[in-house]
Amino acid sequence: MTITADSSRADTTGADATVNGRAAALDGVPPYVTALDWIRGLGFTGAKEGCAEGECGACAILVARPSTTGDQTTEWVSINACLIPAASLDGQEVITAEGLGTPDELHPVQREMAVRGGSQCGYCTPGFVCSMAAEFYRAGRVADAHPGGHDEAEHGANGFDLHSMSGNLCRCTGYRPIRDAAYALGEPAADDPLARRRAGTVPAARATRVANGDAEYVRPADLAGALELLHERPDALLVAGSTDWGVEVNIRGRRAPYAIGIDRVPELRDLTVDDDAYVLGAALTLTELERRLDGAIPLLGKLFPQFASRLIRNGATIGGNLGTGSPIGDCPPALLALDADLVLASVDGERTVALADYFTGYRQTVRKPDELIKAVRIPRPLASVTGFHKIAKRRFDDISSVAIGYAMTLSGGTIETIRIGLGGVAATPLRATATEDALTGAAWTEETVNRAADVLGAEGTPLDDHRASAAYRAAMLRQSILKFFDETTSTDQGAGAER
């Protein structure tokens, strides 16, 4: 194995990460090895493999990252260690359940879990503890007066958001003791070292190159470096949150001969707002977007809580969700309704493509092999009435059978404009153009909506599969617009307006 370093790196002796306060070398670790396997190989076996797909949370760890709110502080973020390459942790700080406390001196989260019966077989407990600790250390948690769109019943008086553990599953406790433990947590102690770390230097992801045999993982220092690498190797795999590729590695044994890590490229992590548009950097995670936008784009505010789990949203990026070309990704329906554009970049420059023109077939897009998604552009002003419906087998932490995004502007009770994005009903995400045409210029009435429901039910080419039948998907499309009408007429229609 060889490891070479970009000239911008401070450390040129090798790749390593700090795990539970001690440096651990990444030398000799193949680029396809997951962070979970590497950490367990170090002897920290609290993190476990359950589903190997990012759904159970048994593998959860804490990683020090720049604050998800965009300020210059540090935040402890929980992620699924089973999905990300170990090489992507080069230069990072990691805490596992073993690093939080010891049997003789339990961490507050571990203590509350123990005394309130939050652990039985114990298999899932370390993952729960790490997710709970991330919320325990969330800045402003105790003073948090903004539920963020969730029911008050899912927030404790201590500000604890139970959705921080929505990606952790337990078959033993029935969850009530775990909830009790979460709601019993107070502020971190003044001398808590992990709490003090939040005010320290923001961790920077250093550029690195890790090679083992015929496999190589490269993380460039900047966008120019990433584009040059992609120009040289258009067959390269682009890796950001790895929430999709990690499943391929674990379940299907896929190996990428050349992977480019772009999750920390600075130019892909900007969020800017001007009079014309919101521009969202492609490498921003869903959690970062949720907290930095803080409801400014109401339709996305409705999407985020339904997107997988907090553990997944902490790693998954908006660019990655679009880059896979999946017809069942949750972002495309909402972004199609918002009339979003994609900024694609290569060494030859940038071009802007309407998202409605981006998908060309099943997991196929107009993006060229040497291009990457730089940003998502959402034009302003936003539609004043929006909605997002996700039909899935579980309330949270699930893949959608059907997803529908609505963005509508009314003028005196008449539909001035409406855009409807659909997912799960064709080989690609798509706009429901026939329904849009049927509604534009019509009165927003029950009679109009009943007619439009039949049109919407016929949109797309839904299939029968293990998630839903074609007939069920069509029925859900019809029901969705009826529900949207009820939502917009029984509540303040201005509630979906841009802030």
Image (spheres, grey):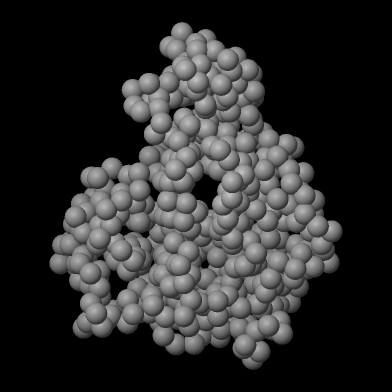
Residue with the most extreme left position: 115
Kindly tell me whether residue 214 is visible in this rendering. yes
Up-down relation of residue 361 to residue 447 (above or below): below
Q: Is residue 58 left or right of residue 365?
A: left
Residue 395 picture location, percent across and down: 38, 39
Q: Which quarter of the figure is the N terminus placed in? A: bottom right
Foreground of the two, 395 or 486: 486
Foreground of the two, 494 or 44: 494
Foreground of the two, 233 or 271: 271
Residue drawn at point x = 84 percent, y = 59 percent: 348
Q: Quadrant of residue 29?
A: bottom right
Q: Which quarter of the figure is the C terminus placed in? A: top left
Residue drawn at point x = 46 percent, y = 80 percent: 201
Up-down relation of residue 143 to residue 462 (above or below): below
Residue 420 picture location, percent across and down: 57, 28
Residue drawn at point x = 42 percent, y = 65 percent: 78
Residue drawn at point x = 34 percent, y = 27 percent: 491
Foreground of the two, 335 or 128: 335
Q: Quadrant of residue 167?
A: bottom left
Number of marks in picture: 0
Kindly tell me whether residue 251 is visible in this rendering. no
Up-down relation of residue 489 to residue 342 (above or below): above
Up-down relation of residue 93 to residue 229 (above or below): below
Q: Is residue 294 left or right of residue 184?
A: right
Residue 310 picture location, percent across and down: 42, 55
Residue 79 picture location, percent across and down: 45, 63
Residue with the most extreme front position: 275
Q: Is residue 101 left or right of residue 411?
A: left
Residue with the most extreme bottom position: 13
